[in-house]
Amino acid sequence: MRIEKRVNDIVDMCVTDRLDLNISHLSYMFSAHILYNHIDNAYMTKRGIDVIALKIDASFKMWKAFCHEAGHMFLHCTDQRHMPRAFNQMQEAEAEKFAILLMMPEKLIMKYELYTAQEVTSYFNVPFDLALKRIEMLIEHTRMTIYN
């Protein structure tokens, strides 16, 4: 639940519609510097400045990578180079969940009544399998809310 709350708080602060879901707007809102490169995606802090390194690639891959690395920025404060493998795997799973939630925010799904994977795919311009995963996450979140 903490990841959902974190993303929802971010969306409430700086996303009004899908046009706000882009690297330029969100990096500005997050006060994060973007370092475009040909090697890899990463998140780091340098002298107190958040830096998201993005490998130059297809626009959707870069968008997904940005959201994933933003997940590390908002959720984690460790250097993965010095952490146990299992801990790194857990952090990667959390960053991946954060990315999916940020790419397809619950607020916009509800606002525009996007209740099928095809509607989510069309609105957010994401692959169908990713939209389907997001719908499944919403269903699971609703179940947990009802039964808790």
Image: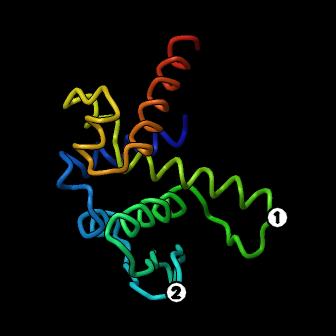
The nearer-to-camera label among 1 and 2 is: 2
Could you say whether the residue bearing mark 2 is in a helix, strand or loop? Answer: loop
Instruction: Name the disc covering residue 84, or none.
Output: 1
Residue 78, percent from left and from top: 67, 67
Residue 20, percent from left and from top: 21, 55
- Tell me where residue 56 sits by quadrant: bottom left
Residue 10 seen in render: yes
Q: Nearer the viewer, residue 16 or 122?
A: 122
> The C terminus lies in which quarter of the figure?
top right
Would you place residue 72 above or below residue 121 in this image? below
Would you place residue 102 above or below residue 41 in this image? above
Residue 10, percent from left and from top: 35, 49
Say whether residue 108 is left or right of residue 3: left
- Tell me where residue 106 sits by quadrant: top left
Residue 51 seen in render: no
Q: Which residue is mark 2?
A: 39
Would you place residue 81 above or below residue 116 in this image? below
Say whether residue 42 is left or right of residue 115: right
Q: Residue at x 52, y 73 (%)?
A: 43
